[in-house]
Every structure is written in structure tokens, then in C-alpha cells.
Image (cartoon, helix red, strand yellow):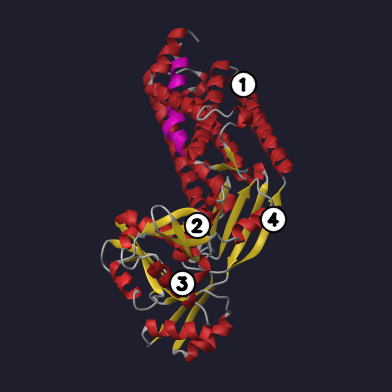
Amino acid sequence: MNGEIIGKLIRDWRIALMLVLVFGSIAGIYLLPPNPDRGLEGNLQFGLDLEGGSWLQLGFQSEIVGFQTDRPVADLIGDLERRLDAEVVWVGEHHLEIRKDFSREALQPVFTEAGAEIISYQRGVSPQTANDVKRILEDKINRLGTQDARVNLLTPAGSDFAQYVRVELAGVDMATAQEIVGTQGRFEIRIYTTGNATEHVLYGDAITSVGVPTQNPPGSNYWGVGFTFSEQGAVAFREAAIEHGAVNSPAEHELLMLLDNETVYSAPLDPNLAAKLRTAPERELSASTGSGQEGLDAAMALEIHLRAGALPVNVDIVGSGSVPAALGEHFKMMSLIAGILAVLTVGVVVFFRYREPYIVLPMIGTTAAELLILLGIARAIGWQLDLATIAGLIAVMGTGIDQLVIITDEVLHEGRVPSPNLYLKRYGRAFGIIAVAATTMFIAMLPLALMDLSTLRGFAIIAILGVLIGVLITRPAYGKIIMMIFSR
């Protein structure tokens, strides 16, 4: 292939786009930042299948109960909380979340006595609670500096209520994994005295309950989080506020909230609260976080901090497992060998079919470019590569070669090189076949990508990304390359 053809290929926008993405992917994997210690792995992240580590599957000790009643729902909830000694949350027009482990048989007489009827019963938590659990676990894991961690909610098919949460920690042994999930942080409230000096007021064990972010006042655009002190905590809080002058000069004696010695909230006492504290302790307080989306985000973060890493519902470990680091390295090496052998085998088969290196090399090069772009995307979004993802990459390579063969066979009908006009017509027909096949693949993989099946999502997402990259980038580039080669 002479320099003139190569120049024309590089100047074509389809091929230029593919090359830019390939070089960008290589830069992201190996140069941003440089990581020579990891060799071929570069900056790619690997899941516990390939890195070694532990996983825990936690079951929620909670149930969602569908109900009917003629009573006001607020009165029913208060009655049930008293009878069950459990937190009950209204999660829908006709559903309650009971944050304690009860069977349907145990709940039935309690609901009857409270003037309600159970319509449905399902183990699990509401989407809001499930997302709270996920945020709390992710915050805890990030705060402890654990890398390569995943937290996935598992929801049964046909249900809106999550039943399990799965935590995967690459490079972490089982004992450490259980400690990370089960340990609460150290929450503390301090008060400014003089200058930058602060004094201890109370610890997180004085907080008996934490509410969800709410608009304060209701209907406004200002957000806050309510929480309740124990009786002893309320007394200690009032005494500290009086002793250090916060009730008289709130702006000069702000309150600090710290989690593991890091400040997570700082604000002066509200003047109305300061006036109340002069006469009596206050158990129920609210921390304001600001207005708009920024205020809501801050309120959601503060809710987690106030809980000090405690989950809104109790969980049981219903499953666990680990992959030794040595076995993970073995899987990694075998995956690399499998990929190389797949590329070589495809190259040999294609060469024997066409007997033309100028066709085989663009096919292999286009496939390699597609894999590099996929790995670059995985690097950019921090996606962890596990065995399912590697299987997806190999599947993408197989379907990609198949589609390139369709293009080549179509434009080389009866072994003859067509004229430019006929070439474009045949290429358009081949691309139509590929587009239909890609659409079918996309539709087939989409449910797996959306479901909470952590072992299959990686495969499905890589397959979908491979289809999109192929149809939008690499197939058009290959068609242009083949056209230029045939024009020799």
C-alpha cells in the first residue's frame, strides 16, 4: 500500500475519528497518569474475579406490606410502631415499610388489631431506602480509602423492592470486608469556644433517630435534616450551649459536626432554638443545608453522616465468598492468553478465506481498534473489568469480525471488485444487514444491562457499547479502508 493511499485514508473523517479514539484510549490507559509499575494493565481497574478479593451479599431485615384501612394512615403507623416496636415508613399510597424482621403470620393479627388488612407481603425495602443503604455503604467504603469496590442492589424480577445488596471489594480479605461493612464511624458534635478552639459536646450514640431530607419550611426550596437526641444527649447539648455562650451569641459559637475527625457540617444555632434552650432541653433538632439542588445534595450527605454509617435497616449476611489474589492473577493471565489466541485464530481463518493480506490486516486492525476504544471507555468511567466483562469483549470481537466479513463478501460479490457506484450500493446493503443485527443485539442485551444482576451486567453493557461503537465508528471506517484498497 503506497503513501498516497495511506494519506487519503488518514484524511477521511471516519478513519481519523477512529484513530483519535484509539490514541485517546491508549493515552488514558497508559499515560494519564503514567503507571509503569502495572505494565500492560496500565490504569485499568479489575474486579475481584481478576484482582482477588471478597464479596458479601446482605439481606434486608425488612418487609413491604400492602394494606387497606379506614383509619388515617398516620394514626395507623403510630399504632403499628407501638405494637411492633419497630420503625414503620409510608412508602406509597397503599404500602408500608416495616424496618424489622417479621413474617406475614406474625404481622397479620397486629394489623387486624390496628384496624387494617394485609393485602400483600414481600421481603425487602423501598427504592428510597435501598438507595440510602447504597449511598451509606459507598460513602463508608470511600471514606475508609478502599479501592475497586462495588455496591449493587439486587431486586427480584417483576418487583420494585430491593431484597439484597451485594458488596464487592477487590483486594480485600473476608475479615476486613466484614469489618468495613459492619463498622460505624465515630460521629461527634463540638462547639467553638474562643478563637478556633472547640470543646466536645456529645458523640453519635446520643442521636436516637435521623430523618430523611425534607423541605424546611414545608413547600419552600430550603432543605434540612431532622434528628432526635436522647434525653441525656439533649441535656448535655443544652448545658454546652449555655456554658460556652452559644445561646446568647450563636454566630460566635458555631456547632461543628465531625465524622472520623473530618468536619461534615458547621453552622450557628438558629435564634429560635437558642431562645428555647435558655429555658429547657430540646430533643428534636433540624440542620439546615441550603436551597435548591445543592441544598438537597448536602442534606442527603448529612443524613448519612448523622447516621455515622449505620444503615436505616438491619441486614444479615446471607452469602459471601472470596477469590485469592494468586487465583485472580491466574484468571487475568488466562483471559489475556484467550484474547490473543482468539485474535490469531480469526486472522488465520480470514487469511485462508481471502488469501489477501490487505484484507486480513484491516480486519484485525479494526477489531483491535474497537477493543482499545472499549477499554478506553472502561478506563474513563472507572468500570471494573471482571470475567463477565472479558467474555463480553471476546463476544464483541467475534460479532465484529462476522460483520466485517459480511461487508467484505458483499462488496466482493462473485470475487470481482465493483465500480465505485456499485460498491457504495453493495456496501449500503451490507450495512443495512449489520444495522438490523446490531439492533437485535442491543434489544437482547438491554434487559440484562438494566437488571440488578451484577454477574451479567458487565457482559451486557460491554456488548451494547461494542454494538454502538461498531455501527457508529469502526464499521464505516472499515468500509472506507476496503474501498481505498480495492481502488488500487
Which labelled disc corresponds to residue 175? 4
- Determine which residue is flagged by label 2: 259
Vertical position of residue 488 compared to residue 479: above or below: above
The disc at residue 351 is: 1
Q: Picture coordinates of residue 458 (x, y %)?
A: 55, 46
Mark 3 or mark 2, earlier in chain: 3
Q: What stretch is highlighted in magenta?
A: 468-485
Q: Residues within 10 Å of mark 2 (few under 14, many from 20)?
A: many
Residue at mark 4 to residue at mark 2: CA–CA distance = 23 Å
Tell me if residue 177 comes above or below residue 314 in the rendering: above
Occupied quadrant, residue 338: top right
Residue type, mark 3 in image: Ala
Q: What element carries label 4?
A: helix
Q: Name the spot of residue 309 as percent of width and height, x first.
A: 53, 61
> Would you identify the image quadrant in which residue 476 lies?
top left
Specify whether residue 65 is in view: no
Real-space Cα distance between discs 1 and 2? 63 Å
Q: Mark 3 points at which residue?
A: 236
